[in-house]
Image (tube, rainbow, N blue to C red):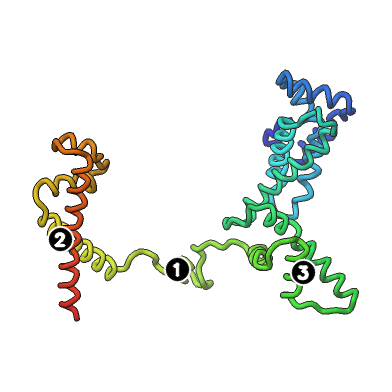
Amino acid sequence: MAFDGSTDYSLSRRAMKAELLDAETELKLAYAWRDQRDEAALHRLITAYMRLAISMASKFRRYGAPMNDLIQEASLGLMKAADKFDPDRGVRFSTYAVWWIKASIQDYVMRNWSMVRTGSTSSQKSLFFNMRRVQARIEREAMARGETLDPHEIRAMVATEVGVPLADVEMMEGRLSGSDFSLNATQSTDEDGREWIDALEDQSAQASELVATTRDAEVLRQWLVSAMGALNERERFIVRERKLREEPRTLESLGQELSLSKERVRQLEAAAFAKMRRTLETQSREVHNFFV
């Protein structure tokens, strides 16, 4: 039963009318799909268990997602289960499909809970779907013992029970307790109120930084020109071809062009860099002495 945009009520009604498969029929359909890629068998298998997908989707309505979207994700999980099911393992298809359906719905809920990514690891997913329930149980048990736990103690106990770091519990609690707000919302009820986006710090470079960066780049360019000027023509050629081209040439290709061995080109390159380094160090000392 493909999801075709029907309302959740009509889809549920159609799913409830689908046939109930016995173990033998289910096995035949699974073999037909796996071995012969029989699409009719696949459709019959999925249709029969669509009620299971819808039932599981309904358990996640409290997370605020539209029921139609939950059913669609559940049906995708059901189809993945049918595609990967191995009838030779001796388990019922419904037992196998439950895990795929649940995983598909959980991924969808977590993707759409917030524009900020809520979590992706298995521990974070377990925390997302179990934290509130575990918190409530811990508080009930404490009340039954006549104890009063502070929020930090509760978070620590949740972290221990779910098996995640305390920092993960604190982060998840913050994300679940709030919701996303538009940065274009005004900070006051006044129509001319400033938007929240106007209060964000401008991360782009400031004018003074741009001037300093441009000046430094020009100084470095002049130093490089001066250092290149200290080289002879052959050394300048080698440095240009080895370091200033988009695709640097090899020592071997330069050696062929200059009628030199590869080792001799390497020596000339090293000598040229040594000359340039001395020139740059001299210029650096002169600048330092100027400001001291």
Mark 1 vs mark 3: in front: 3
Inspect the image, locate mark 3, and give the three-letter code of the amino acid beneath it: Met
- Marks 2/3: CA–CA distance: 64 Å
* Residue lying at 84% horizontally and 25% vertically, measured from the top left: 27
Residue 201: image x %, image y %?
Answer: 42, 69
Q: Which residue is mark 2?
A: 222
* Residue lying at 72% horizontally and 75% vertically, measured from the top left: 152
**Pointers 2 and 1 in contact (CB under 8 A)?**
no
* Residue lying at 57% horizontally and 56% vertically, measured from the top left: 115
- Of the residues under marks 1 and 3, which one precedes in the sequence? 3
Q: Is residue 37 left or right of residue 276?
A: right
Q: SS of the residue at dot 3?
A: helix
Q: SS of the residue at dot 1?
A: loop
Where, quadrant-wise, is the C terminus in this rendering? bottom left
* Residue lying at 66% horizontally and 47% vertically, measured from the top left: 108
Q: Disc number at residue 200?
A: 1
Q: Nearer the viewer, residue 260 or 147?
A: 260
Q: Which residue is mark 3?
A: 157
Residue 146: image x %, image y %?
Answer: 89, 79
Q: Disc number at residue 21?
A: none
**Pointers 1 and 3 in contact (CB under 8 A)?**
no
Q: Nearer the viewer, residue 97 or 233?
A: 233
Task: Tell me the quarter of the picture where residue 104 sits.
Answer: top right
Dot 3, crowdedness within 10 Å: few (<14), some or many (≥20)?
A: some
Mark 2 vs mark 1: in front: 2
Residue 140: image x %, image y %?
Answer: 86, 70
